[in-house]
């Protein structure tokens, strides 16, 4: 239904139809919109979950996740590399997520900041 929000920077909380689920943020690779309307798919290090939500609400509830495309939220801590030519982000699990031209500079800056920490 609606995200519960982030208690701190290390936990991602959300609510499905019948259950509230908490996932350590470092286990969230990315979230994408589902072909099924009004649903999203969370890709984690150990699992994949589909639940009813929209990316805008998840982005507001989770400032640690970054929108790289209108259909994707990614965890910058799990970016392996960015291909500017193909406009793709490779995640630590090998997944490829597209990024839009308008998000390119912000995404690259975020990636550089994460690598400096």
Image (tube, grey):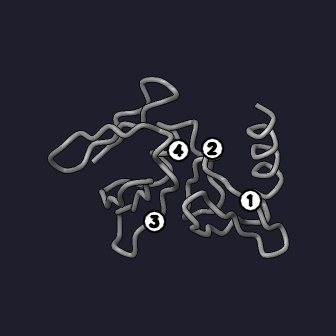
Rendered view: 9 above or below 113:
above
- Mark 2 vs mark 3, foreground winner is 2
Residue 115 is left or right of residue 63, and the answer is: right
Which sits earlier in the primary sequence, circle 3 or circle 1? 3
- Mark 4 vs mark 2, foreground winner is 2
| Distance from Cα at disc 2 to Cα at disc 3 | 20 Å
| Distance from Cα at disc 2 to Cα at disc 1 | 11 Å
Give the class, few, some or many, for how many residues have Cα within 10 Å of label 3's Cα (few <14, many ≥20).
Answer: many
| Distance from Cα at disc 3 to Cα at disc 1 | 22 Å
**x, y (%) of residue 34?**
40, 69
**x, y (%) of residue 37?**
35, 70
* Residue identified by numbered label 3: 33
* Residue identified by numbered label 4: 59
* Residue identified by numbered label 2: 77
Residue 104 is left or right of residue 90, and the answer is: right
> Please, what secondary structure does the residue beneath circle 3 have?
strand
Which sits earlier in the primary sequence, circle 4 or circle 3? 3
The image's mark for residue 81 is 1
Which sits earlier in the primary sequence, circle 4 or circle 2? 4
Which sits earlier in the primary sequence, circle 2 or circle 3? 3
> Please, what secondary structure does the residue beneath circle 4 have?
helix
Give the class, few, some or many, for how many residues have Cα within 10 Å of label 1's Cα (few <14, many ≥20).
Answer: some
User: Which of 94 and 60 lies nearest the eye of the viewer?
Assistant: 94
Residue 66 is left or right of residue 36, and the answer is: right
> Please, what secondary structure does the residue beneath circle 2 have?
helix
| Distance from Cα at disc 4 to Cα at disc 1 | 22 Å
- Mark 4 vs mark 1, foreground winner is 1
Residue drawn at x 54%, y 65% as measured from the top left: 71
| Distance from Cα at disc 4 to Cα at disc 3 | 13 Å
**x, y (%) of residue 31?**
48, 57
Residue drawn at x 48%, y 63% as measured from the top left: 32
């Amino acid at each position: 239904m609606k995200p519960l929000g982030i208690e701190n920077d290390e936990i991602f909380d959300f609510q499905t139809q019948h259950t509230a689920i908490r996932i350590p943020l470092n286990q969230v690779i990315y979230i994408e919109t589902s072909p099924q309307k009004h649903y999203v798919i969370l890709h984690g290090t150990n699992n994949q979950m589909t639940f009813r939500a929209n990316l805008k609400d998840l982005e507001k509830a989770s400032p640690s996740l970054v929108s790289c495309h209108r259909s994707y939220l990614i965890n910058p801590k799990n970016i392996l590399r960015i291909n500017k030519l193909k406009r793709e982000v490779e995640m630590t699990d090998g997944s490829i997520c597209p990024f839009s031209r308008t998000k390119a500079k912000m995404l690259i800056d975020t990636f550089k900041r994460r690598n400096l920490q």
